[in-house]
Image (cartoon, grey):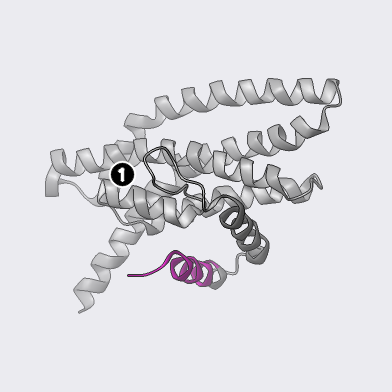
Amino acid sequence: MVTVEERYEHLEKTIRGYNISADFEQIRSAYAYAREHHGAQLRRDGTPYITHPIQVAQIVAEELRLDSESIEAALLHDVMYVFAAFVLFRFPIGDSFIAVALTILGYSINATIVVYDRIRENKRLLGSKVTVDEVVNVSINQSLTRSINTTVSTVIAMGTVCVISVIYHVESILVFSLPMLIGMVAGAYSSVCLAGPLWATWQNYKAAQNKQK
């Protein structure tokens, strides 16, 4: 079975192949810190906490019976935006980064599950009568209103926290809330505009490869 680290390295090579610059070592170090300090903690049911985005993607893909590559790419997109926010505003990368990144992963994966669940249902209802692209398009349109409403409400709440932290000079709150605000927008974008189309592109690519064989 392919490990989380092996999947991460494979996805990292793929992203580098598109000449996308990202400090993967910083992100890798942050998650190594999370595993070191929180990996031994257990939930009430005895299962360990999940501290890696690739692991989250694999679990969700398994539950929805869909490929995990597009989910992995969308989640890494969100983590990169969080990391960019910390670098841009020169916030220290530590516990706050881990907290924001894991929270955004949970937020984004929840929104992505909604879209992917619609894709799964529409695949079953529409069958082979429509193309993969049409299934994804219909699924995104069906879940778009819900995604927009959720994003707007959470962004307004987090934006209020940011404004209050700036007014009262509460830097510890600002270090958390501002990257969280940026991550929420990035997460909503990746869930609606990236995860579904990436899955459709991947399915079309695999179909083309199978035809060549």
Q: Is residue 6 left or right of residue 139?
A: right
Question: Badge 1, how many Cα within 10 Å: few under 14, some, many 20+?
Answer: many
Query: Which residue sits furthest bottom?
Result: 213
Question: Residue 84, how many percent across, how many down?
Answer: 70, 50
Question: Residue 37, how many percent across, how many down?
Answer: 61, 52
Please tell me which residue is depicted at 51% across the width and 52% down the height of the picture.
Answer: 40
Region of the chain picked out in magenta, as a range: 1-15
Instruction: Give the structural element (helix, strand or loop) at label 1.
Output: helix
Residue 71 shows in the view? no
Q: Is residue 177 magenta?
A: no
The answer to which of 53 and 191 lies nearer the viewer is 53
Q: Is residue 4 magenta?
A: yes
The answer to which of 165 and 11 lies nearer the viewer is 165
Question: Residue 154, how many percent across, how many down?
Answer: 56, 25
Figure disc tally: 1
**In which quadrant will I find the C terminus?**
bottom left
Question: Residue 172, how many percent across, how many down?
Answer: 78, 33
Please tell me which residue is depicted at 67% across the width and 46% down the height of the picture.
Answer: 97
Tell me which amino acid carries mark 1.
Val
Q: Is residue 9 left or right of residue 137?
A: right
Up the image or down, 138 lies above or below 163; here it is below
**In which quadrant will I find the N terminus?**
bottom left
Q: Is residue 126 left or right of residue 77?
A: left
Residue 24 shows in the view? yes
Q: Give the residue number, with chain letter if any, for mark 1.
A: 136
Determine the main secondary structure of the stretch shown in magenta.
helix
Please tell me which residue is depicted at 40% across the width and 30% down the height of the picture.
Answer: 144
Quadrant in the rendering for residue 167: top right
Please tell me which residue is depicted at 31% across the width and 65% down the height of the picture.
Answer: 205
Q: Is residue 121 left or right of residue 15?
A: left
